Amino acid sequence: MNVAFAATNEAYLSAPQLMFAISQYVRIKLGQAFIESPPISLHSLYQDMSIMTPLVFVLSTGSDPFGGFQRFALEMGFKERVQSISLGQGQGPVAEKMIKLGANRGDWVFLQNCHLAVSWMLPMERLIQTMAETPDKIHLDFRLFLSSMPSRSFPVSVLQNSVKVTNEPPLGLRANIRRAFTELDEDFFEDHPLSGDWRRMVFGICFFHGVIQERKKFGPLGWNITYEFNDSDRECALNTMKMFCTGHDIPWDALEYITGNGEITYGGRVTDYWDLRCLKTILKCFFAPHTLKSGYMYSTSESYYCPEAPGLQSLDQYREFIDQLPLIEGPDIFGMHENANIAFQYKETQAVIGTIVEVQPRESGGTEGRSTDDIVFDLADDILRKLPELIDPDNTLPPLLRLDSKGRLPSLSTVVLQEADRYNKLLVIIHASLDNLQKAIRGFVVMSEALEEVFKACLNNQVPKMWSSVSYPSLKSLGSWIQDLLLRLDFIEVSTWLQHGPPVSYWLSGFFFPQGFLTGTLQTHARKYDLPIDELIFDFKMGTVVLDQNLIRAKHLELHGE
């Protein structure tokens, strides 16, 4: 693997480029097919089904297999013999009646969103088991289809005795558009009075759908709120477009409003004002009168456009054109800066590296030294020895607790006591989890899932989620994080504040909640000069010499209460 990487560009060794290097390596060693999303073939899955073997669609965000299921039922001649229901509260008895009726008549039954009917999962399991025990009473044409998000409540026996398929949205813009054109019908795409304009409009809608789906990978830079756009939105937009475009005229105002500008198809999912504004702008780039003009480009790089060749009319020809699009798209097609793409690539790299670390074997042989249990046990022992059990508020310097003439505790004293309380909560969790982990390693208590997570994190030199969830923000590894925590505890209690009074210089980033310190500073000044706190602001001046020891100083900053 290292040889393959060395044979490519040296830039692949950088974190943002690692995913490109992995894709290149897989393509060279295994072939192009292994870096592309394979289409789901219901025809092949159907061959493995029977009256006793259902098909389970494992859903993910943005996926909707029902449209593909309906097309498959039409191809198999079962369009009029399909019964479906979306499960939820109170829908269990209706679904049970539907299954029994379908088993008698030989219908196809599709139960959608099983994860929303937790209370009915046990009756469903018993019903399916009963049917499996009496196959002679079931019509030979009967088939059962289920869809569910990953859920602990889904019956294990049903899952084990079923055909399972994940229905994840395709990764990448090209794969997204390719999937859309795979699901298109030839007559729908090729036979229309608008001819070439119609095909450009369909291509634009599919491209628009792919772009807004892929923008989600940029996180809050793509959308302020993550929206679950799915295949049914695209199908609804295309069907609406066909309904309005019955002749040679294109009602653009109506189409744009229904598709994205109004609160109907895509726009109906968007709740944030700025996201809706962004959606409308993106729609104009792919679905508007000017997009039908010859030579129109979807991106500034001119890599994306709708094909215009006179002989390019069939659906298969468009699919071949889509297969020639770049496998890895640039950020310009999404209207994003290259820095946004680098941030996404770095995030993907960290996820891959984290996964690789997680799947590494944990046991080592005798020739390799100590076992992983010994390593983690000693590490936990070292951390427990270094960290104090608690910050003792009884050791607080008495002047810090002296009340003023109005019976109020000094604002900065309140700040430091609150900081001590936050650090104490963190210390309690660290000590309790490590104590239990050592007991679990020795076999005195059960190794729970939470303790297993702490074990793996310690072994991988990572901060356990159990700690980070109640801790201050940090990107440090476990060793550096512990050293940083010791410095913070020393700043709060031992060498400076609680035991020796307010320091001359404050470590601003050493606070658990820096905003509280800044507010306490304003409150101190407001009380001293009898001013309303909401009228105070901070003023910043760069300097190298401290002229006034009454100023509250922070590292690299001077905070004036004026």
Image (cartoon, helix red, strand yellow):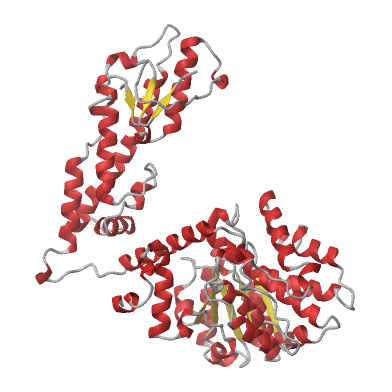
Residue 47 screen position, x and y as percent = 55, 92
Residue 268 can be seen, yes or no: no
Residue 242 screen position, x and y as percent = 81, 76
Is 282 on the left-hand or right-hand side of 258?
left
In the displayed structure, would residue 209 be above or below residue 480? below
Residue 411 screen position, x and y as percent = 42, 19
Residue drawn at point x = 27 percent, y = 50 percent: 478
Total labels drawn: 0
**Which is more toward the observer, 508 or 59?**
508
Residue drawn at point x = 64 percent, y = 66 percent: 300
In the displayed structure, would residue 493 be above or below residue 483? above
- Classify residue 201 by image quadrant: bottom right
Residue 464 can be seen, yes or no: yes
Residue drawn at point x = 31 percent, y = 78 percent: 1
Residue at the top extreme of this rendering: 405
Residue drawn at point x = 38 percent, y = 63 percent: 15
Is 125 on the left-hand or right-hand side of 292?
left
Is 131 on the left-hand or right-hand side of 315?
left
**Which is more toward the observer, 315 or 116?**
315
**Which is more toward the observer, 91 or 144?**
144
- Classify residue 452 by image quadrant: bottom left
**Which is more toward the observer, 295 or 109?**
295
In the displayed structure, would residue 80 be above or below residue 355? below
